[in-house]
Image (spheres, helix red, strand yellow):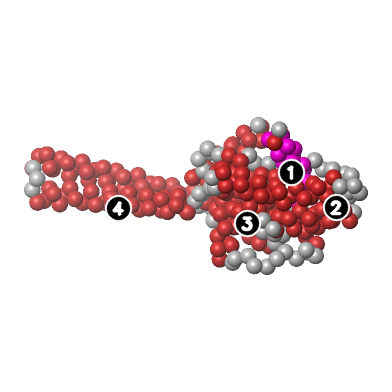
Amino acid sequence: MAGRIEEMRLVALCMLSDNREAFSRLVEMHQEGLRRFVFNLCSGDAALTDDICQETFLKAWLAIRSFRGLSGFKTWLYRIAINEHISYRRKYPAGVTTDLSDPQLTSISLDGGQKALEANMDITVLLEQLSEAERAVTLLFYLEGIPIKEITKITGMPEGTIKSHLSRARKHLAIILDKESAPGARSNSSC
Amino acid sequence: MKHQNTDRIDSAIRGQIQSELPQCPQNPWFRNKVMNRLPARRSRFASIVEWAFYVVGGLALIGGWWSAINAMITQGPTPSTLVLSLLPFAITLSAIAIIAIPMLRRSAHSL
């Protein structure tokens, strides 16, 4: 709650007095989450992630006075990011599969072991099998923990469509859970 | 029962995704790059001068409307009073268009 109030204060400063320090603070608050979301949305392309995220924040600054505060600032920001990604995909349709040997895809490993590496690749591979829209919805719901009603505002999709996407994603991603619960699977559950 | 099962699966998937999905590689310059891309700050003096012109222009427009209405009332609708009325009307429409069109365009491009 305190974080939300601080965020509203910073947004108000940006809107009323073009306060760049306040905007810098907002960038700092949201960059990590946004970059992680966009990174996984862009299938591990770090350069593209940074481009999209920079454009997102730039557009947020330019349009800050049109932010009505009906949804959270994060919701608004993620909506800009998804629109930026869609615009990019319209110009440059995706056609290249992810390089699974790319070390960026396996940069996070909880126990440094082979099983963490495999789980990491499994999740990434499974996400790759989803469509762009399904992947976006999946990341928003599972990675960011955003409720479905907020996701409708971010993506502009009806609630039924989002639930349908999540249902498909659940079927794919449940494979990981089956592997984890199988005998001999690694014991450190992260749930 | 099915709903509880879905919640359980969601919770498990969420945990896996949040811990296993890769983070974007660190970029310590990201915030600086964003701030450097923001448009240049507007000079306070330029803003004051700009607003002074808006105020003077607004007052002149009000004066124009007042004299046009006054002329229409005292002299009645003659060709000269009609022309006098059209001028502030045209200037008002132009001012509204100059202000409103960029705002509408920004709203259309924003979310």
Q: Amino acid at mark 3?
A: Glu
The stretch of residues the image draws in magenta is B3-21
Please state the horizontal and vertical placement of residue A154, each as a whole percent of the image.
Answer: 57, 46
Look at the image and tell me in which quarter the C terminus of chain A lies. Answer: top right
- Count of marks placed on residues: 4
Of discs 1 and 4, which sits in the foreground?
Answer: 1
Check disc 2 and report the residue beneath it.
A116
Check disc 1 and report the residue beneath it.
B14
Q: What numbered label is drawn on residue A132?
A: 3
Mark 3, secondary structure of its residue: helix
Residue A122 appears in which quarter of the rendering? bottom right
Calculate the distance from the C-alpha at mark 3 to the C-alpha at mark 4.
Answer: 45 Å
Disc 3: CA contacts within 10 A as few (<14), some (14-19) or many (>=20): some
Mark 2, secondary structure of its residue: helix
Name the side, left or right, on which A65 lies relative to A126. left
1 or 4: tag closer to the N-terminus: 1
Q: Residue at x 58, y 62 (%)?
A: A89
Name the side, left or right, on which A162 lies relative to B21. left
Residue B7 belongs to magenta span: yes
